[in-house]
Image: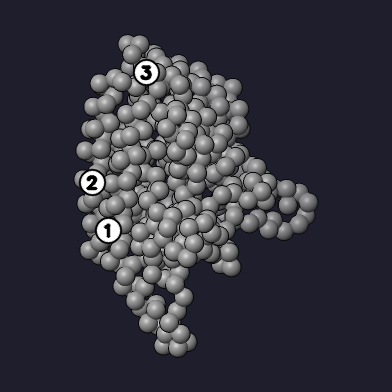
Amino acid sequence: AETRYRRIRPSKAAVMRSGKWQDVYFFTTTCYSSTGSDDGRLQLALDLISEVGRLGCRLVVVDASQAPIHAVLQRAVEGHEGCAVWRQKSAGRKGAALREALGLALGEADSADSAAAAAAAAAAAAAGTAAGVEEPKDGGHVFIFTEPEKVGFPTLAVVELVPLFFQCVPGDEDAGARPEVVLPQRTDAAFRESYPLEQYHSESFANALINGLFHAAFAARKAARIARRESARRLSSGSPGASGPYCSICGGSRASAAMTAPRRVLCGDGGGGDGGGDGGDKDGVCSCVEWFFGPFLLTRACAAEWLHCDAEMWLAQLLPVVRCLAAGRRVVSAPVRYRHPAAMRAAEEGALEWMEKRLDQINAIVPAMRAEFGKIRHS
């Protein structure tokens, strides 16, 4: 399967078409201490609940906090229709809670679709006409995971990212193909200015390292596919074929270092030609893929990759992305000007505890990602 990974921005028309925020389902996980050590993070989670409620979106929170904190979270959703806090039932840590939250969000979407279909059928019957109820399309609902402390991200997501699901992927306009997964990418300035300094440097390094693995995994497959395409093109047209250098995310090309209009590209397979690129692209894989931000957006078509992934902690967010890419899903990257809450930076910058956590995170994620990419490399 051809794997598509691009960087695009929403069109104005797509923004207008995506105005039904009740079809947007946020899901997140929480687990806070009742000793007071998590008070700042808890307050941010409460702020995020209020933000989603004001947007009119739906929210599923799966919580593993002790009873007093759980009660605080439940009170926070009161008055926000479509927002709910559930006690975690599945055994495990963040990964298990994430899968449970996504499952609940999918269930709520199913219920909403069934209710809408029933209402349409009843209205048609009352009018004495055929029901003509259209089956819900996969793109009708957008599911968004975010960490609960990322206040401000929900607003950016519905304004800048959700509209991407209502426009065609660049290069696939004729086929009417729309994104299935959107990976937000922090802009460097906002990342550098608002995050703890150690986190900015550690995650920038880790992103670069994993992108190196990303490149290596797909490079061999790319070369073989390009060779087959070029051979077929020469046989059919007698021409050497166009060189199609194109950075799937930056839009950089070998022909010009300027930003170009996005075209079809295969993840590590160089859709138009021989790869390369002045925009940070190496054999069809761009160096600016964002792996460590955390949030992601998806349609129902790709939900199984997350539901069936048994990873815990951060890998429950990342491994399904790699599997979607390997399966040829339409995965899109888009910049977002997210600024981290000042309270988070104040609490974590320069703190040994958090520096050690960043190191532990890299040491847990990188070997697992190397192994996952290795499966692709040798497939």
Is residue 248 among the parts visible in the rendering? no
Query: Disc number at residue 216?
Result: 1
In the displayed structure, does residue 17 sit left or right of residue 274? Answer: right
Q: Which amino acid does label 1 sit on?
A: Ala
Residue 147: which quarter of the image? top left
Foreground residue among 278 and 358: 278
Q: Is mark 2 on a helix, strand or loop?
A: helix
| In this picture, residue 82 sits left or right of residue 289 | right
Q: Is residue 198 left or right of residue 296?
A: left
**Crowding near the residue tagged with mark 1, few <14, some 14–19, many ≥20 C-alpha atoms within 10 Å:** many
Q: In this view, does 273 lie to the left or right of 206?
A: right
- Quadrant location, the C terminus: bottom left
Residue 17 percent coordinates (x, y)? 66, 48
Q: Where is residue 168 in the image (x, y as percent from the top left)?
A: 57, 58
How many other residues sit within 10 Å of disc 3, few (<14), some (14-19) or many (≥20)? few
In depth, the one of 132 and 188 nearer the eye is: 188
Splitting the image into 4 quarters, where does residue 157 fall?
Answer: top right
Q: How far apart are marks 3 and 1 (CA)?
A: 37 Å
Kind of residue at badge 2: Ala
Q: Which mark is residue 190?
A: none
Residue 189 seen by the camera? yes
Q: Relative to 39, say whether 296 is above or below.
A: below
Identify the residue under disc 2. 368
Which amino acid type is marked by label 3? Ala
Q: Mark 3 points at which residue?
A: 347
Disc 3 is placed on an element classified as helix
Chain-order first, disc 3 or disc 1: 1
Q: Vertical placement of 159 versus 323: above or below? A: above
Q: Distance between the residues labelled 2 and 3?
A: 29 Å
What residue is drawn where x is 46% and y is 75%? 242
From this viewpoint, which residue is outermost toward the right?
Answer: 127
The first of marks 2 and 3 along the sequence is 3
